[in-house]
Amino acid sequence: MLVLAYFSYQYIASVYDRGRILPALGFEIWWIYIWVPLGFAITGIQYGLTVYKNLTSPDVYLSAGVLDGYAETESEV
């Protein structure tokens, strides 16, 4: 995810250098795309935290705060 964040940031920088604007709204296109590297970076940080939690804990975690496993009670679907 962090590698994707890096490459998407490079793409945003190239779009920024071109100075393209949206014809109807009049603002620069890179403002629309800036959320992509930000999302990749946040996801990469979350994955890193999950890896750290799984390496330092005897249990298995799906994320830094969610323990993997099944509920003790059955629920009907």
Image (cartoon, rainbow, N blue to C red):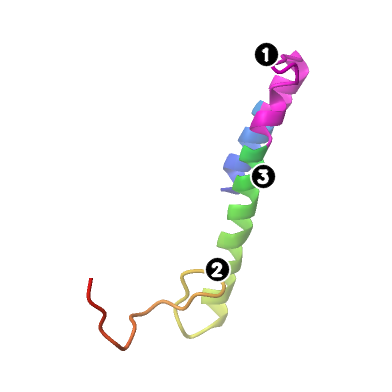
Residue 38, labelled with which disc? Answer: 3
Indicate the amino acid at tag 3.
Answer: Leu
Q: Is residue 6 left or right of residue 70?
A: right
The magenta region covers 12-34
- The amino acid marked with disc number 1 is Ala
- Amino acid of disc 2: Thr
Tell me the quadrant of the picture where the C terminus can be found. Answer: bottom left
Q: Nearer the viewer, mark 2 or mark 1?
A: 1
Dot 2 lies on which element?
helix
Q: Are marks 3 and 2 in contact (CB under 8 Å)?
A: no
Which mark is nearer the camera, 3 or 1?
1
Compute the Cα span from label 3 to label 2. Answer: 18 Å
Q: Is residue 75 left or right of residue 63?
A: left
Residue 59: mark in rendering: none
- Going from N to C along the chain, the mark reached first, 3 or 2, is 3
Q: Which residue is mark 1?
A: 24
Q: Position of residue 42 (x, y in %)?
A: 64, 53
- Residue sitting at 67 percent across and 13 percent down? 24
Residue 50: mark in rendering? 2
